[in-house]
Image (cartoon, helix red, strand yellow):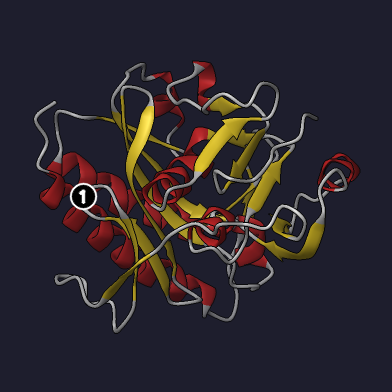
Amino acid sequence: MNLDHTHLTATIRRLALEAGDVILEVYNSDDFDVRTKSDSSPVTEADEAADALISAGLRAAFPDIALVTEEQADSHAVRADTFLIVDPLDGTKEFIHRRGDFTVNIAYVENGVPIRGVVYAPAKGRMFFTMPDGHAVEETGDLDKDTIGPVRPIRVSDPDNAALMVVASKSHRDQATDDYIAKYSVKDMKSAGSSLKFCLVATGEADLYPRLGRTMEWDTAAGHAVLTGAGGRVVRFDDHTDLTYGKDGYANPFFIACAPSVNLKKG
């Protein structure tokens, strides 16, 4: 597909920032409603408002590219090798408990591979995205919606396999995850919510992020793109082959995100 990646980068970055404003307006209010979806996951008015904003913006800018978004069930029937995929508010549980570890996620998948993406954590003021050439950056400064400000290239660590930094889920930690992490020589561990875990591996703040639990492609695509742009990998837990996208139902298997020189263990 002949896509203008400069336009793509500018658009998904701007929409993520605009969605962040909508989300923070709800987050900083005195109270907001929380409902339960059919899959038992929580949803708030912030999820829905951010989804409406991002979806409208993407459909206007890229009308010929299929769009898959968490909050629109009819989009989950889309079947394409190349598509845009959105989680307008990843980490809803973190949002509800006002813990700050929630993100806006927009990604572009081409031939089953997430090659461009943006992850924005509005409560933390951290913005990660892929530049038009695919390399990943973290933007600093005032995050002006129309102009990309100062950026720093990010790169995965060159880890010491005898002293690994591991990041794991804040809301979905379980014994199976702890048992798997115990196979490694771990220097330190940290917990983080949402797709920020991918970004911590991308910046070298962590070396390894295993996920032994249910995720959907919209949860992971943007973080996967950022991590790939920083030299990292996301592989299936079972056979360590690359995690691909456009799968039936957009459901992921267990996976591991890591710096490439981590000596991965079998489960």
> Compared to 226, does 3 lie above or below?
above
| Residue at left offset 59%, top offset 28% | 252
Q: Is 262 left, or right, of 125 in this rendering?
A: right
Percent x, y of residue 83: 30, 29
Secondary structure category for the residue under label 1: helix
| Residue at left offset 85%, top offset 46% | 174
The C terminus sits in image quarter: top right
Amino acid type of the residue tagged 1 in the rendering: Gly
Percent x, y of residue 77: 42, 19
Percent x, y of residue 123: 50, 75
Number of other residues with Cα within 10 Å of mark 1, as a class: few under 14, some 14 to 19, many 20 or more: some
Question: Which residue in the protein does label 1 denote?
Answer: 57
> Compared to 255, does 24 lie above or below?
below
Q: Is 134 left, or right, of 169 in this rendering?
A: left
Camera-nearest residue between 230 and 200? 230
Q: Is 30 left, or right, of 165 in this rendering?
A: left
